[in-house]
Amino acid sequence: MTEVAFHFNVPEKLAYACRLLRKAAATGARIVVTGEPGLLRSLDTELWTFSTVEFIPHCHLDSAEPQVLAASPVVLADSPRGAPHQEVLVNLGTAVPEGFERFERLIEVVTQDDDDRLRARARWKHYADRGYQIVRHDLASKEAR
């Protein structure tokens, strides 16, 4: 069964996603990132510019050649269906990602924005109603330490 984790109270979604992807890729994990197309375009730009000394190899599912998809540790996808691997799925979007149950792990990234939190509650309920055990990572409580 897919391991589901929610990362709550993220101050800035794209910057946090970049750090999360950098950390996961450094461990050798293969990650698919899903969300709305505009957000994924912004993440693509951010991945190129967030660090002057590091690069996180990534590509878009819809436009990359098969050999690039196979070699990229991070794949950006409007929908995770058809992704070249099913290890880790990071959801930056507002809806439950179609086909999430095929992945070993799902990470939901949730900001402090009220609308984002409201939509995250609906996703949490979706997973809980289907018997998924959910791990909660509250960044606000970590900052308070």
Image (spheres, grey):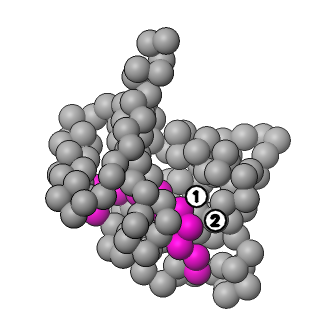
Outermost top residue: 145
Q: Which mark, residue 30?
A: 2
Percent x, y of residue 85: 58, 76
* Image position of 43 (left or right of 98): right
Which of disc 2 and disc 1 is earlier in sequence?
2
In the rendered image, the vertical position of residue 46 relative to residue 79, given as above or below: above
> What amino acid is at disc 2?
Arg
Three-letter residue code for mark 1 = Asp
Whether residue 18 is situated above or below residue 35 in the rendered picture: above
**Dot 2: what SS?**
loop
User: Does the rendering let one see residue 52?
Assistant: yes
Q: Quadrant of residue 63?
A: bottom right
Left/right of residue 103 with respect to residue 45 in the rendered view? left
Q: Is residue 52 left or right of residue 124?
A: right
Quadrant in which the N terminus is drawn: bottom left
Task: Label 1, secondary structure: give it.
Answer: helix
User: Which residue does the image show at 26% across and 43% down from the upper left?
Assistant: 116
Q: According to the image, label 1 marks what residue?
A: 44
Magenta stretch: helix, strand or loop mostly? loop
Packing grade of label 2 (10 A; few <14, some 14-19, many >=20) is: many
Residue at left 78%, top 40%?
52
Q: Is residue 138 magenta?
A: no
Picture coordinates of residue 67 (x, y %)? 73, 85
Q: Residues within 10 Å of mark 1 (few under 14, many from 20)?
A: some
Look at the image and give the residue range highlighted in magenta. Answer: 84-96
